Image: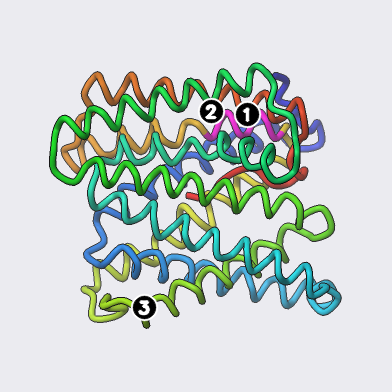
Amino acid sequence: MSPRVDAEVPRARIYGGLVLGVVAVSWAAPLIRFAEAPSLAISAWRLTFASVPLLALALLRSRSELTSLSTRTWGWLVLSGLALALHFATWIASLQYTTVASSVALVTTQPVWVTLFAWLALGERVGPRGIAALVLCLAGSVLIGARDFAAGGTALWGDLLAVAGAVMAGVYFVVGRRVRESMSLGTYVGIVYSVAAVALMLAHGFVDSPLTGFTPSTWMVLVGLALVPQLIGHSLLNASVRHLSAPFVAVASLGEPVLSTLWAVPLLGEKPDWVQLVGGALALVGVLVMSRDEAARQPPPPDMVPAAD
């Protein structure tokens, strides 16, 4: 797999941005564990803080594009935003029940769900490598789930929430791939993040979950989640795809769960056992195989990679 380096930009800058982007997004899970707030509030504020500058940029740079969107396109954008909201709500909730290692390994299986939904909804064929990747991810997920089930407690529920987060990320990306064929990345992200933020804020009207009253340290964590993993991390990953091939960046992004697990050892005292390591490795190999198969069949938009954490 060739990285396809852009000769006009220094290599150190290209690869440095990619590495910094992966490191930035890897801090999402540990930071979430430090936030003393309900998972729904964490999701809502993270997306709200991130969507404000993104929507402002879209309004400044792409006002004509925004006003020219059809009703059908707006419908797809709302669907994509709702899927993103559910992704964050379920995945962030999973971190209250299971370990960082299990959660990030399971939510990283999103490319597998992208391929599955593309087959079911768009009629895209799944080849032998795609089937092998599905089996590997399923085996890894079952191994992690079986380990947590045997351990008792609420860990298995957390695993299921992480898988649900991966499923919703798959819906978000499949819908986004269709809409992004006729829309710039900045406009798409600004609208979808805003829809997701509004949906999560409105969801608080139906549950007994506070949105305010948190400690100053928790507010700092919430702002940090929007700034570091969301705005810095994902912006750098999307920028990397302008100079490197999307498959190369997608594979490099697999460093996120590895780094998240490493940060959790000294910061949270969570040392993964061999079952989690084997299960996570199987899932990541499956994602790697699926990413390469997906890239060979139908590459994603040139400036967008699967990234929802």
Name the element at disc 2. helix
The answer for how far apart the CA atoms under marks 1 and 3 are is 36 Å
At x 64%, y 38%, the residue is: 13
Q: Which image quarter holds the N terminus?
A: top right
Question: Which x, y percent locates residue 273?
Answer: 21, 23
- Horizontal placement of 246 versus 198: left or right? right
Which amino acid type corresponds to the residue marked 2 in the rendered image?
A: Val
At x 82%, y 53%, the residue is: 181
Q: Nearer the viewer, residue 91 or 230?
A: 91
Q: Is residue 89 above or below residue 243?
A: below
Q: Nearer the viewer, mark 1 or mark 3?
A: 3
Which amino acid type corresponds to the residue marked 1 in the rendered image?
A: Ser
Q: Main secondary structure of the magenta part?
A: helix
- Residue lying furthest left: 152
Q: Quadrant of residue 204?
A: bottom left
- Horizontal placement of 199 versus 123: left or right? left
Q: Is residue 18 above or below residue 137?
A: below
Q: Is residue 284 above or below residue 260?
A: above
Residue identified by numbered label 2: 287
At x 62%, y 68%, the residue is: 54
N-terminal label among 1 and 3: 3
